[in-house]
Image (cartoon, grey):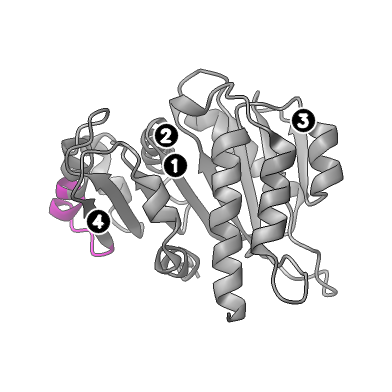
Amino acid sequence: RSWNQWNFMQLHSLLLILHLVVGEFTCEMMLSQRWKEVSVKNSRSGYNYLLYRPNQPNDPSKKWPLLVFLHGAGENYRGVPYDLLIQKFVEMHQSPDDELVPLGYMVAPSSRNKPWDETNLNVLVEEIVQSEPIDRDRIYGTGMSMGGFGIWRFAAEFPNLFAGIIPICGGGNERKASLLKDLPTWVFHSRRDPIVPYSSSTSMVDALTEAGAKQIQLTTYENDLHDSWTETYENPKVWEWLYGQSKS
């Protein structure tokens, strides 16, 4: 497999791990033993979060992209066997030379069973930008269900923050569409989603189109599942598109 294929597989796997573990932060020691690139911190934003750091380059001037991942309501306080998840990731998604070379930084805050607050999320992102070598032109956002709603609101409140977003089975405020018309956005939703109506996404896409958005696209899954994220995150083309976006 090519270097890019390995990297996108690693990114997908990390997101699935974060999807499962982000609601619990009692595993700091286990995570640090199994995967030292992941650390658990407390933030002035009020959020606990998982921060994934790439292996630092020899060039200290190198800047890295940052992906913000917002979980859904179902991930709050979910208990999972963390050691087995991390071990499975390492075993199945190492490259042939046993290196893990992620595409950049990733942060996954825990909402602790509350709606996402875009102001606090911005404080969190600014903390990371100030403390880590982050490329401000390549900050990305994705989330599913409650996290999909959160990414829409976050981007609308801070429209100059992101270089691209991927809201999955969420929805936003159509009246703020004009603030997002220049933001590359790829939306995903199942047509017969039993939890979040499909119209929650299509109304945002329609509002953005009417506002003059040129970089908006919608992928519709023809099923009756709420889970639109697994197929989305398994698609390497999604990540190629997202990481190809830059504000510069």
Element on which disc 1 rests = strand
Q: Which span of residues is magenta-colored? A: 206-215
Three-letter code, disc 4: Thr
Q: Which mark is residue 150?
A: 2
Discs 3, 2 touching: Cβ within 8 Å: no
Residue 214 position, x and y percent, is 23, 64
Disc 2 crowd rating (10 Å Cα; few below 14, some 14-19, many 20+) is many
- Indicate which label's residue lies in the foreground, 4 or 2: 4
Residue 22 as seen in the image, left or right of residue 235: right
Contact between labelled residues 1 and 3, with CB atoms less than 8 Å apart? no
Q: Is residue 195 left or right of residue 211?
A: right
The tag earlier along the polypeptide, 3 or 4, is 3
Residue at 18% across / 58% down in the picture?
A: 212
Disc number lying in front (2 or 1): 1
Q: Which residue is mark 3?
A: 27
Q: Amino acid at mark 3?
A: Cys
Which secondary structure lies at badge 3? loop
User: Hey, what amino acid is under mark 1?
Assistant: Gly
